[in-house]
């Protein structure tokens, strides 16, 4: 059955998709309402007719950008054969994003976390929830790998999950500020090394 989308929903989706890379590149503070009207070709009234304010647009854009990453991760997870491969999906996905999507602003979680901090609690909360969800997913994969006899039983799951996320996001940050993609590559090599350490051989 074909999904019926209202004109309001189409307009809202258009605004989100059109301004997604804009917010990711310029950030919440750096993106003005005139930027939004220029990018979409819509009037200020049209945008405010679909969103309460600029922050409302930014939150929707964050959710959209994050959902794109989650979709890519799910697709790669479906083809991963081992729990080791599943853990490497995160590194491989972000490596792909870094190499092919930096022109669109890079990682929305990292960008939002750095910018929002304590100045925008709603954006900070969105980024925090994304990181916590990511951490929980990694812990679940490691635990499944332990149960399956692929990973060592004494693995500190939370420590490893935190390290994987920190290495990936830190590698992205270093690559962006130094314009050196090798920084992320080295971080991903370290992720692979950490995972190798917990394998039962």
Image (cartoon, rainbow, N blue to C red):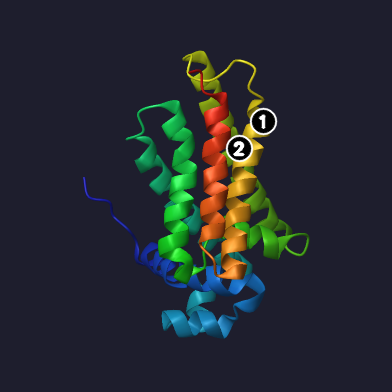
The disc label shown at residue 158, or none: 1
Above or below: residue 166 compared with residue 64: above
- Neighbor class of circle 2 (other Cα within 10 Å; few <14, some 14-19, many 20+) is many
- Neighbor class of circle 1 (other Cα within 10 Å; few <14, some 14-19, many 20+) is some
**Nearer to the camera, 33 or 118:** 118
Q: Residue furthest left?
A: 1
Residue designated by label 2: 135
The disc label shown at residue 194, or none: none
**Nearer to the camera, 129 or 191:** 191
Quadrant into which the N terminus falls: top left
Residue, x 72% and y 63% (percent of image)?
120
CA separation, marks 1 and 2? Answer: 8 Å
Above or below: residue 83 compared with residue 116: above
Labels 1 and 2: the sequence-earlier one = 2
Above or below: residue 133 compared with residue 51: above
Frontmost of labels 1 and 2 is: 1
Q: Residue furthest right?
A: 118
Residue, x 42% and y 44% (percent of image)?
73
Residue 191's spot in the image, x, y percent? Answer: 55, 41
Quarter of the image where one finds residue 26: bottom right
Per the image, label 1 sits on a secondary structure element best described as helix
**Nearer to the camera, 85 or 43:** 85
């Amino acid at each position: 059955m074909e999904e019926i989308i209202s004109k309001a929903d189409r307009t809202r989706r258009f605004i989100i998709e059109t301004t997604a890379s804009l917010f990711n590149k310029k950030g919440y503070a750096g993106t003005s309402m005139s930027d939004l009207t220029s990018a979409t070709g819509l009037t200020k009234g049209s945008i405010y007719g679909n969103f309460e304010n600029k922050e409302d647009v930014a939150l929707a854009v964050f959710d959209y950008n994050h959902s794109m990453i989650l979709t890519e991760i799910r697709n790669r997870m479906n083809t991963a054969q081992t729990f080791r491969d599943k853990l490497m999906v995160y590194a491989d996905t972000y490596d792909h994003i870094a190499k092919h999507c930096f022109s669109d602003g890079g990682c929305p979680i990292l960008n939002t976390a750095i910018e929002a901090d304590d100045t925008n609690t709603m954006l900070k909360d969105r980024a925090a929830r994304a990181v916590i969800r990511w951490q929980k997913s990694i812990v679940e994969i490691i635990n499944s790998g332990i149960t399956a006899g692929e990973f060592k039983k004494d693995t500190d799951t939370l420590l490893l999950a935190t390290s994987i996320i920190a290495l990936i996001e830190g590698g992205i940050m270093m690559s962006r500020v130094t314009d050196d993609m090798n920084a992320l590559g080295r971080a991903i090599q370290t992720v692979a090394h950490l995972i190798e350490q917990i394998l039962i051989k």
